[in-house]
Image: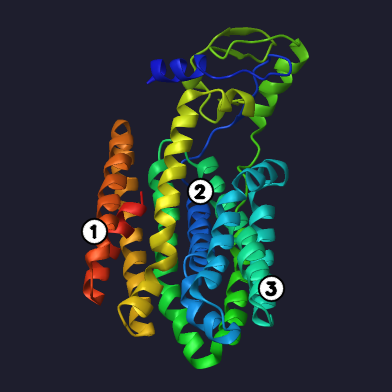
Amino acid sequence: MGVKHEEAASATTISPNDGRTEFQPRAPDGGFGWVIVFASFMQHVLSIGIAYTVGVYYPFFMEKFQVTSSTAAWVSAMHFATFFGMGPVSGWLTNKIGTAAVSFSGSIIAGCACCAAAYSHSIYIVIVCFGLIAGIGSGFMFIASVTAVSRWFDQKRPLATGIAVSGAGIGIFVCAPFFRLLIDHYGGEGALLIEGGLALQGCVFALLLRPIPPNEKCKKYNDVIESKNERIPLQKAPLDDGSAKPFPLMMLPNCAPKVYETMGSVVRSRTFWLFAVSQFLTFVSSMGPLVFLYNRAVLDLGVEPMQASYVLSILGIANTCGRLLFGALANRFPKSSLYLLSGTIMTYGVATAFSVLGTSFWSLAIYAVIFGAGYGT
């Protein structure tokens, strides 16, 4: 185990500012971290529940504003574009002001945007409010909650992240029929107001996304390094008398070397671009089923609106099972994570190609299970 720690230390990037090693508190891998996982789980329920069930409102938008399905689809298109497009912005803000502040702000933005959409008298205002602005808020909630979990866990990160993001599937499973029920009883405007109120509840969970408490021992090490004003290799640790001697990193159980990595070093990596292009193509292809699956059931196959919402619920619960299963597998077989990802993408890609042959609710339900579980990776 000591060899592994030393190998990891030697590969760590040193601060580009002055070349000195800096230590930070080590990820606890438990403790209050499980509260962070719960808060992140609930933020996923709310943010993904809002984002992935916009299609439930399509018939309402088409009837109220007398627009075509392609025009109504701009609401989802804009929501998803900003939801995922805010990743770099929310990541930068998270580093500046913390995960709690970003997630809290996102909850307020999403909640107010949903309420504003309820009073809109034009589909274009809905696109701006429910699409653009609510997408920004949901994106802040989503990215900040994922980042918070990754900071509290190291060895158990795949499992903890899998549990946290499984809230996405629960959000789809619960919200799709729930919002459809609200539309039937209170109309689209009332449903949007209630949805806005639910988004505002995310403020409560955002406050739980605390950073790792500071560690006095790490601060002491950093003070020694700063007072010496010299670069100390990561394989050596500062001692109380100010000297630095070879020291196994595992002897510092509560501290870890801080990794500095600039955006420039990331974008110059060929691996980064291969993965980025792969994920771009994956998300482009997966947006179609997520946006139009409900519409296909209602408009093309003649399924009742409430029953069609169950297709999204089936997709959601399969998504949750997939995230938990593949999170556990990634934690158990970390070297096989890439093969798991590639295999599941290929599986639900083939299922999407053959889904056009389905002509009934049950055929869509089977496809929703395959797609939901695969998308859960």
N-terminal of the pair, mark 1 or mark 3, is 3
Place residue 104 in its image quadrant: bottom right
Residue 262 visible (yes or no): no
Q: Amino acid at mark 3?
A: Ile
Q: Is residue 59 visible?
A: yes
Residue ID for mark 2: 33
Amino acid under disc 1: Phe
Amino acid type at image mark 2: Gly
Closer-to-camera residue (225/105)? 105
Task: State the residue position of label 3.
Answer: 125
The way the protein has been coloured in the rendering is rainbow
Give the number of the mark in front: 1 or 2: 1
Q: Could you tell me how far apart the alpha carbons at marks 3 and 2 are, in whole angstroms?
A: 40 Å
At which x and y percent is residue 198? 58, 74
Q: Quadrant of residue 123?
A: bottom right
Whichever of labels 1 and 2 marks the residue nearer the N terminus, that label is 2
Label 2: state its secondary structure. Answer: helix
